[in-house]
Image: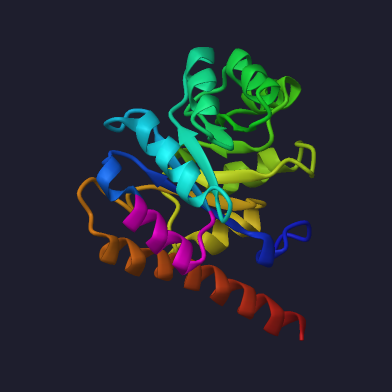
Amino acid sequence: MSDDIQTSDVQIIAILRGIETAEVEAVFGALIKAGINRIEITLNSTLALKSIELAARRFGDICKVGAGTVLTQQDVEQVAACGAQFVVSPNCNPDVILATRKAGLGSYPGIMTPSEAFGAIQAGATGLKVFPAEIIGPTGIKAMKAVLPPNIPLFAVGGANPDNFSAYIDAGCSGFGLGSFLYRRGDTAQRVAVQAQIAVSAIKDIKRAALEQIG
């Protein structure tokens, strides 16, 4: 287990891509009940802004509601007006990061190289989304983590799942962005609840094993 990562602090960000507004309350409820309290709705979903506004109004006091696939400064302005609390992007765009921080929102840009990582940090990123994580893998993330400021959290997105959580945590990741593992377009809230519980239980099992090693 990486010395600077406490497993109890490992976060899961649920990525809802393609969700319909009518599904928001049930799916958010299932995720929150399972213990996931950071949830993003991607802007390439149907009526995404309406869904974000609904989620923020209904659940903003008990979970962090975010917007994903945010690509422009105009996107930032729109999601901020809807009540989003954080912004996630697939790429590293300093203008988007700066606009996000100016709006008072958390900024999680996508990066894959040290140059992108340091550029994002310089622009004010709250944390870094390593994407697609399956390409760089835990080995690459560990090498990059060694040169990054220790207070900057890394989230593995794209290829991360309960089967490999341990490897990514050992590499220095602070959390995971889970998309299709948790939700695919048209999934019922019941299926989401099952998948969310699997993911949360996996984190708890890793924590338990780490504590047993210490004890």
The one nearer the camera, 126 or 40, is 40
Would you say residue 182 is visible in this rendering?
Answer: no
**Position of residue 3 measured from the top left corner of the image (x, y, whole percent):** 78, 61
Q: Give, as a single range, the part of the protein colored magenta.
A: 25-37
Which image quarter is the N terminus in? bottom right
The one nearer the camera, 150 or 83, is 83
Q: Is residue 8 left or right of residue 84?
A: right
**Position of residue 87 measured from the top left corner of the image (x, y, whole percent):** 55, 32
**Position of residue 89 measured from the top left corner of the image (x, y, whole percent):** 50, 28
In the rendered image, which quarter is residue 94 located in? top right
* Residue shown at 75% from the left, 42% from the top: 146
**Is residue 194 depicted above or below 91 in this figure?**
below
What colouring does the structure picture have? rainbow
In the rendered image, which quarter is residue 97 located in? top right
**Number of dots carrying numbers:** 0
* Residue shown at 65% from the left, 23% from the top: 103
* Residue shown at 58% from the left, 36% from the top: 86
Would you say residue 74 is visible in this rendering?
Answer: yes
Q: Is residue 54 left or right of residue 93?
A: left
Which residue, as the protein is rendered here, is positioned at the far front? Answer: 57
* Residue shown at 53% from the left, 35% from the top: 84
The one nearer the camera, 146 or 48, is 48
| Main SS of residues in magenta | helix
Q: Is residue 35 magenta?
A: yes
Which image quarter is the C terminus in? bottom right
**Is residue 25 depicted above or below 112 in this figure?**
below
Q: Is residue 133 magenta?
A: no
Which residue, as the protein is rendered here, is positioned at the far left? Answer: 186
